[in-house]
Image (cartoon, rainbow, N blue to C red):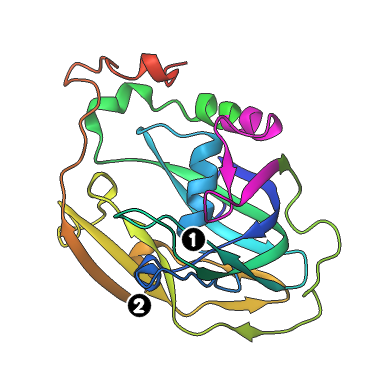
Amino acid sequence: MEHPNIVEFQVSGAYALFSDPIMRVGGEKCSYQIPTYEALKGILASVYWKPTLIWVIDRVRVMNPIQTEVKGIRPVKYFGGNDLSYYTYLKDCVYQVRAHFEWNENRPELAKDRNENKHHEIARRMIRKGGRRDIFLGARECQGYVEPCVFGQGPGAYDQVPELAFGLQYHGLTYADEAYSPETAGKMTAHFWHPVMKNGIITFPRPEDCPLHKPLREMEAKPFGDPHGNFSGLREFGEVE
């Protein structure tokens, strides 16, 4: 199904680190070979976000060959001093992304802000400007850059590879304010899936369509505005246009 509010952009960076947060507890990080749904959603939220809407990532296209580089890092310990860890990064990363937004039905107090054309035009303008906030490819030290593109245009490194599977991977998180069912209401839920790249393109399932779900903890949604539709608390962040 085609959505009228589709956005397309290219994100690039010298390094990227896309990983399952559960696998970082040992102090050393190793990137997945491809970006996660949650990382791409976070990039788009840095470009333009409001609690009125939810970004849905449809597809990502891997433009450059998948390469890794190991770096020795000296992270700061919680109780002082430094440690030595090895981080495995992706390098020379370029991705084309296609996404759309939907209204957040858990925010009825923001129903008056559901102006599809307004949000679509602002999002496209923010993509042209490189985003409202800093862009990161999975980790704070991996600076990224966003620019408009036409999804599928230009040669990609895996255009001629019919199919490439990556096994079980972390997909993303659903927070309480984006709950899509009674089972996810009032909870933070992690999702997992089995990504397959076909001719360089990975098509993401929606969070609710992932085969594996893991409730993490109870949480409450942060309130915005009031029952009368006033946007108190949003103006200071420039969120009201």
In the depicted view, which residue is nearer to us: 85 or 112?
A: 85
The vertical placement of 213 against 61, above or below, is below
Q: Which residues are magenta?
A: 123-146
User: Of helix, strand and loop, which one carries label 1?
Assistant: helix
Q: How many C-alpha atoms fall within 10 Å of the one at disc 1: few (<14), some, or many (≥20)?
A: many
Q: Which residue does the image show at 86% across and 64% down from the upper left?
A: 155
Residue 148 position within the rendered picture, expressed as x and y whole percent measured from the top left: 73, 41
Q: Is residue 12 left or right of residue 134?
A: right
Foreground pick, 134 / 105: 134
Location of mark 1 (residue): 37
Q: Which mark is residue 211?
A: 2
**Amino acid type of disc 1?**
Tyr
Percent x, y of residue 113: 37, 23
Residue at x 16%, y 59% (from the top left corner):
217
Q: Is residue 122 magenta?
A: no
Q: Measured along the vertical axis of the image, is residue 212 above or below residue 40?
A: below
Q: Place residue 164 in its image quadrant.
A: bottom right
Within the image, what quadrant is residue 183 found in?
Answer: bottom left
Indicate the secondary structure of the residue bearing disc 2. loop
* Residue 88 disc label: none
Q: Position of residue 95 (x, y in %)?
A: 69, 58
Residue 63, percent from left and from top: 76, 64
- Quadrant for residue 125, please give it: top right
Name the amino acid type tagged 2: Pro
In the displayed structure image, the side of residue 215 where residue 139 appears, left or right: right
**Residue at left 56%, top 29%?**
132
